[in-house]
Amino acid sequence: MGDLYALDFDGVLCDSCGESSLSAVKAAKVRWPGLFDGVDSATEDWIVDQMHIVRPIVETGYENVLLVRLLLEMRMSSIRKSSVAEGLTIDGILESWSKIKPVIMEEWGENRETLVDLFGKVRDEWMDKDLGTWIAANRFYPGVPDALQLASSSIFIVTTKQSRFADALLQKLAGVTIPHEKIYGLGTGPKVEVLKQLQKRPEHQGLKLHFVEDRLATLKNVIKEPELDGWNLYLGDWGYNTKKEREEAASISRIEILQLSDFTKKLK
Ligand SMILES: [Mg+2]
């Protein structure tokens, strides 16, 4: 018998918030030319700082682009186009993002696919032009590269990031090669479906199943699926979640709250 670990990428293995925030500012400038005219560097720095605070609500990368514009609209009434920005606070975003998101998408006339493509393209261009600074804007959490390298368990990565970015970071920043077929990235379906696929494979029968994630909503989706009752679920407390979410997770018996040092030990 052995263990199978399905691991989220951003917020579990890698802290990519610096990179995703900077990429989102770049993408916002491409998508809405002129929006940043007259925006000084202090305001831009403020936006990037706030992006770290609101990071727990981001499920998929393109949402960062929306958040950049929303933060700018909150700060500068002159460019305000959405009905929600006035009087909105950072806490308000954390509380109500799922309600705010469809409203601003509608009011700005945006669609998901266009923003997903754009966000990917901006990252590709940054990587092509200057791989060094792109990689340097990311960091693996302490002990994670070693743990991945030495892991005796079967490791799968289940992420909403595009696989090629996860792959580049694993190889170039962590020095770890994870076979392509073990990285389930954006476009491979919801995480609950990936977990179902993994547990069905004949070669995984008899393995103890573990899923490590930093987003509470994702773990709650797993709990809703009776078929996935066999998975041990962990919320990584070092990732992108809020104190309120960790408190909620502590009250859910299916979920174990994990610290980084225990996580890296578990993999080895
Ligand atoms: Mg995550």
Image (cartoon, grey):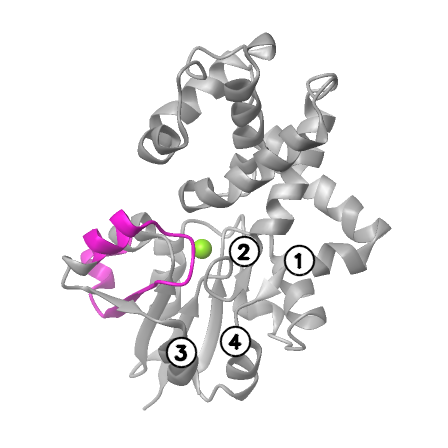
Residue 37 inside the magenta-drawn segment: no
Question: What count of labels does the image hold?
Answer: 4
**Residue at left offset 43%, top offset 10%:** 83
Quarter occupied by the N terminus? bottom left
- Answer with the quarter of the image where residue 192 lies: bottom left
Give the class, few, some or many, for how many residues have Cα within 10 Å of label 1's Cα (few <14, many ≥20): some
Label of residue 164 in the image: 1
Check disc 4 and give the amino acid type.
Answer: Val
What's the CA distance linking mark 3 and mark 1?
A: 27 Å
Tell me which label, 3 or 2, sits earlier in the chain. 2
Q: Position of residue 193 (x, y in %)?
A: 37, 55
- Gap in angstroms between the C-alphas marked 3 and 2: 26 Å
Among the two numbered marks 3 and 4 on one chain, the one whose residue lies closer to the N terminus = 4
Indicate which disc, 2 or 1, sits on the residue closer to the N terminus: 1
Label 4 near label 1: C-beta < 8 Å?
Answer: no
- Left or right: 159, with 176 as reference point: left
Residue position for label 2 = 185
* Contact? badges 3 and 2 (CB < 8 Å): no
Q: Are marks 2 and 1 in contact (CB under 8 Å)?
A: yes
The crowding category of the residue bearing disc 3, from other C-alpha atoms within 10 Å (few below 14, some 14 to 19, many at least 20), is few
The residue at label 1 has a CB less than 8 Å from ligand 1: no
Mark 2: which secondary structure? Answer: loop
Element carrying mark 1: helix
Helix, strand or loop under label 4: helix
Whether residue 129 is situated above or below residue 6 in the rendered picture? above
> Could you tell which of marks 1 and 4 lies nearer the N-terminus?
4
Instruction: Name the residue that disc number 4 marks.
Output: 144
Please state which amino acid type lies under the numbered disc 2: Gly
